[in-house]
Amino acid sequence: MGAAKQIRVKVNDVDHDAVIDPRTSLADFLRGELGLTGTHVGCEHGVCGVCNVLVDGRSVRSCLMLAVQADGRDVRTVEGLADGEKLHPIQEAFMEEYGLQCGFCTPGFMMSICELLERNPDPSDEEIMEVIGGSICRCTGYDSILRSVRTAAAKLGGARA
Ligand code: FES
Ligand code: FES
């Protein structure tokens, strides 16, 4: 381990102080240090998107970002979507539209979709495809994920259903 580094990161509205190996990825920090295992790890080189989280509102591949780069920043993971027992509209939409099968890719999709819908509440199908095409799903064929995003947008107040 290189010289340990102290960081403070806000994750899902809770501040966390930690002393970590500076080579620790954000994904490993979230999973290993904070126990937030909803963020998955697949390819570990920025291709599959299962590790997507939001940092200061922008979707990032947490396998490619070092935890020290998140020092002082605001991170949101899939665990932060639900409000207690109440699912987030994106989660409800994935359930209703069968936007998942094995579910391994789902947290990463949900976080990039969260960024999209916060930036653009009424995206076109092309805009949705551009975002969901950035992650790999081996199960669904993407149609149900596209429907899930449309439904989530409608639930959140966007116009298209
Ligand atoms: S695990 Fe990060 S992009 Fe695949
Ligand atoms: S639901 Fe299985 S990989 Fe996407």
Image: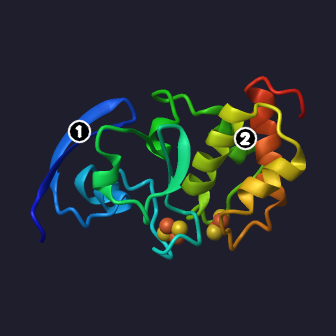
Residue 9 on image: x %, y % = 29, 40
Chain-order first, disc 2 or disc 1: 1
Residue 23 on image: x %, y % = 25, 67
Residue 132 on image: x %, y % = 73, 57
Label 1: element kind: strand
Question: Which marked residue is nearer to the observer: mark 2 or mark 1?
Answer: 1
Farthest residue in the left direction?
A: 3
| Label 2, label 1: how far apart the Cα atoms are | 31 Å
Question: Residue 16, labelled with which disc?
Answer: 1
Verify CB contact (< 8 Å) between mark 2 and mark 1.
Answer: no
Which residue appears at 72% of the width and 40% of the height? 93
Q: Say whether residue 75 is left or right of residue 107.
A: left
Whether disc 2's CB lies below 8 Å from ligand 2 is answered no
**In the depicted view, which residue is nearer to us: 2 or 63?**
2
Question: Residue 45, labelled with which disc?
Answer: none
Residue 7 on image: x %, y % = 20, 45
Whether disc 1's CB lies below 8 Å from ligand 1 is answered no
Quadrant that contains the N terminus: bottom left
Which residue appears at 49% of the width and 75% of the height? 45
**In the depicted view, which residue is nearer to us: 69 or 86?**
69
**In the depicted view, which residue is nearer to us: 121 or 22?**
22
The disc labelled 2 sits on which kind of residue? Ala
Q: Is residue 47 above or below residue 74?
A: below
Label 2: element kind: helix
The disc labelled 1 sits on which kind of residue? His
